[in-house]
Image (cartoon, grey):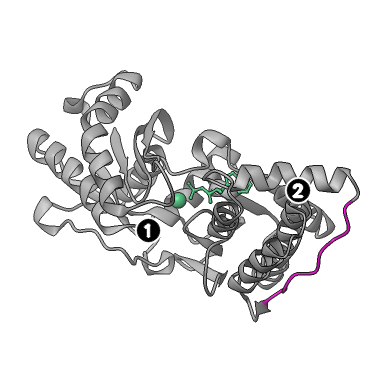
């Protein structure tokens, strides 16, 4: 029985996993009164809700802290003060109940919960969120990054654009709705900078272009449609090349932006043309959550990975391909 703690950014989440069964998924998300997230404010929020979220996650799972074998925590990547708040909670439980800690990479947790929930063995994963944009696939004991953003993440592109246009945070859902309305009204596609360099993508040119066009009086809905079409086409191109290179059949979408129906439609069309399929992580596990940390923690724990509190630490930069993936066999 493993408890997982997630605290890399705006969400403090906690979940329990036992033999790959996800028993609970409780979270409390910090919402800044205005603008973006200030890490110290989010960390204070996490410290305040930690005890409540942990208790509820154990109760919902029908267990108690004394039943736990280990506590898994998100080591990174993320915001320093937020990560520290999660580690303090994890260490407290570890000391109190005399159990070890398991350090989990946040990006890998997104992939693993998607693989389990969609029952898909070996996909090319598109991890698209407010803080990350990566195309990832498993090869020889590592999750390798085949392509990624060279500047801002795709969710951040939507959020910054919406903030500039006076729409509430997070911007993604508003962009999707307005883009659909523009498409239904038959709006013309506005041309935006399509920047794919090798396997990597760049979104900062799109952001400056749409801000300028908005200031010049362009229609917000038509811009939303254009920003989706161009940014998603770039992602689909890189995903397709990663699938061709790795000879994998299926694509898996994880992270907050994976909720977008148009993105799924484009990736699914591409995957079907290649004879494969596309999957999207269920909404409850799409955003940051503690259950995905518990799941990876359990798999790591079973292969002998654990640490005492003196060995535990967090790190703001923690690359997906740094982790030795001990829990997937060679056949994958
Ligand atoms: P995460 O960082 O995984 O918590 O996801 C949050 C990000 O997902 C934010 O940048 C949101 O704007 C974005 N997002 C949420 N829903 C949608 C959507 N329907 N379409 C596009 N982006 C979305
Ligand atoms: Mg995330």
Q: Main secondary structure of the magenta part?
A: loop
Q: Say which of 271 and 27 sits in front.
A: 27
Residue 185 higher or lower than 143, as above or below: above
Q: Is residue 180 found left or right of 133 in the rendered image?
A: right
Q: Residue at x 19, y 41 (%)?
A: 89
Q: Which residues are magenta?
A: 187-195
Q: Dividing the picture into quarters, in which one does residue 248 lie?
A: bottom right
In the image, the residue with mark 1 has its CB under 8 Å from the nearest atom of ligand 2: no
In the picture of the structure, the residue carrying the numbered disc 2 is: 179
* Front disc: 2 or 1: 2
| Left or right side of 52 for 194 | right
Disc 2 or 1, which lies upstream in sequence? 2
Residue 144: where, in percent of width, then height?
A: 50, 68
Q: Is residue 129 magenta?
A: no
Q: How many marks?
A: 2
Which residue is labeled 1 in the image?
Answer: 326
Residue at 65 percent of width and 43 percent of height: 174
On whether ligand 1 comes within 8 Å of the CB at mark 2, the answer is no
């Amino acid at each position: 029985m493993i408890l997982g703690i997630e605290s890399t950014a705006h969400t403090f989440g906690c979940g329990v996993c036992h033999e790959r069964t996800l028993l609970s998924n409780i979270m409390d998300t910090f919402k800044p009164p205005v603008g973006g997230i200030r890490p110290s404010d989010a960390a204070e929020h996490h410290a305040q809700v930690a005890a409540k979220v942990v208790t509820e996650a154990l109760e919902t799972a029908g267990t108690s802290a004394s039943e736990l074998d280990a506590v898994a925590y998100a080591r990174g990547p993320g915001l320093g003060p937020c990560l520290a708040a999660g580690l303090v909670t994890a260490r407290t439980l570890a000391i109190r109940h005399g159990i070890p800690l398991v350090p989990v990479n946040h990006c890998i947790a997104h992939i693993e919960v998607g693989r389990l929930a969609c029952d898909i063995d070996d996909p090319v994963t598109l991890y698209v969120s407010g803080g990350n944009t990566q195309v990832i696939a498993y090869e020889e004991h590592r999750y390798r990054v085949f392509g990624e953003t060279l500047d801002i993440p795709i969710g951040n592109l939507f959020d910054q654009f919406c903030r500039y246009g006076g729409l509430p945070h997070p911007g993604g859902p508003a962009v999707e709705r307005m883009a659909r309305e523009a498409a239904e009204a038959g709006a013309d596609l506005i041309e935006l900078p399509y920047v794919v360099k090798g396997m990597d993508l760049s979104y900062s040119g799109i952001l400056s272009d749409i801000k300028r066009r908005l200031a010049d009086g362009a229609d917000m809905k038509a811009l939303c449609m254009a920003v989706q079409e161009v940014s998603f086409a770039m992602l689909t191109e890189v995903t397709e090349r990663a699938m061709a290179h790795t000879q994998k059949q299926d694509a898996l979408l994880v992270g907050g932006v994976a909720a977008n129906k148009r993105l799924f439609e484009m990736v699914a069309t591409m995957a079907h043309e290649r004879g494969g399929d596309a999957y999207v992580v269920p909404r409850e596990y799409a955003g940051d959550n503690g259950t995905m940390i518990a799941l990876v923690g359990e798999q790591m724990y079973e292969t002998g990975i654990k640490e005492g509190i003196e060995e535990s630490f967090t790190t703001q930069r923690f690359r997906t391909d740094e982790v030795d993936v001990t829990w997937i066999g060679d056949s994958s």
